[in-house]
Amino acid sequence: MKKHIVRAAFAGALLTLAVPALTACSSDDAAVVEPADVVFDASHVDSSMFAAATEVDGVTIIDVRTPAEFAEGHLPGAVNIDVSAATFADEIAQLDPDADYAVYCRSGNRSRAAIETMQGAGFAALIGLEGGIGAWGGEVVTG
């Protein structure tokens, strides 16, 4: 009889040890990124870091896709400045080069080009969304 009690206690101990290990890997327990953790260093970051960047006071979110793509769905509060438009350089020249900017596109390629152009124009506080809006897990608005 003692063997069964010991086995049950041992099995319970394993279950007790396994549950925290399983829950620690849960996507619900993903590390929360705070706006204070964001570094606007012209790098492309994952969606959780980008989401935190969009919460930074004073940040401007720029969607560099075409107006048609923008109308199909964009991040809340985003402004559309099409990097492929001939007017892109003129439009960014109207922006404050000392402000913070979170830049995204469809996949991450155009936002890289936009950030490079913006850096050349004297902008320093930039961050891009790795994987573009396709990697975004948050709210998208249309119109």
Image (cartoon, rainbow, N blue to C red):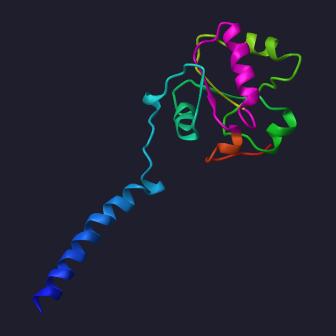
* Rendering quarter of residue 119: top right
Residue found at the far bottom of this picture: 1
Relative to 44, residue 69 above or below: below
In this rendering, is residue 100 above or below 98?
A: below
Total number of numbered labels?
0
Q: Is residue 13 left or right of residue 142?
A: left
Quadrant of the drawing holding the N terminus: bottom left
Residue 71 highlighted magenta (yes or no): no
Residue 62 spot, x, y in % from top left: 70, 27
Q: Tell me which residue sits at (59%, 12%) in the image.
A: 124
Name the image quarter holding residue 72: top right
Query: What x and y, as percent, mark residue 65?
Result: 80, 32
> Which is nearer the eye, 93 or 15?
15
Q: Position of residue 107 (x, y in %)?
A: 73, 37
Left or right: 68 as drawn, with respect to 105 = right
Image height of 57 relative to 6, above or below: above
Image side of residue 130 versus residue 93, left or right: left
- Boundaries of the magenta span: 105-132
Placement of the C terminus among the 4 image quadrants? top right
- Relative image position of residue 40 (x, y in whole percent): 54, 21
Residue 30, relative to residue 56: is it above or below? below
Q: In the displayed structure, does residue 54 sit left or right of residue 30?
A: right
Q: Residue furthest front?
A: 3
At 66% across and 39% down in the image, what residue appears?
A: 76
Residue with the most extreme left position: 2
Q: Quadrant of residue 13?
A: bottom left
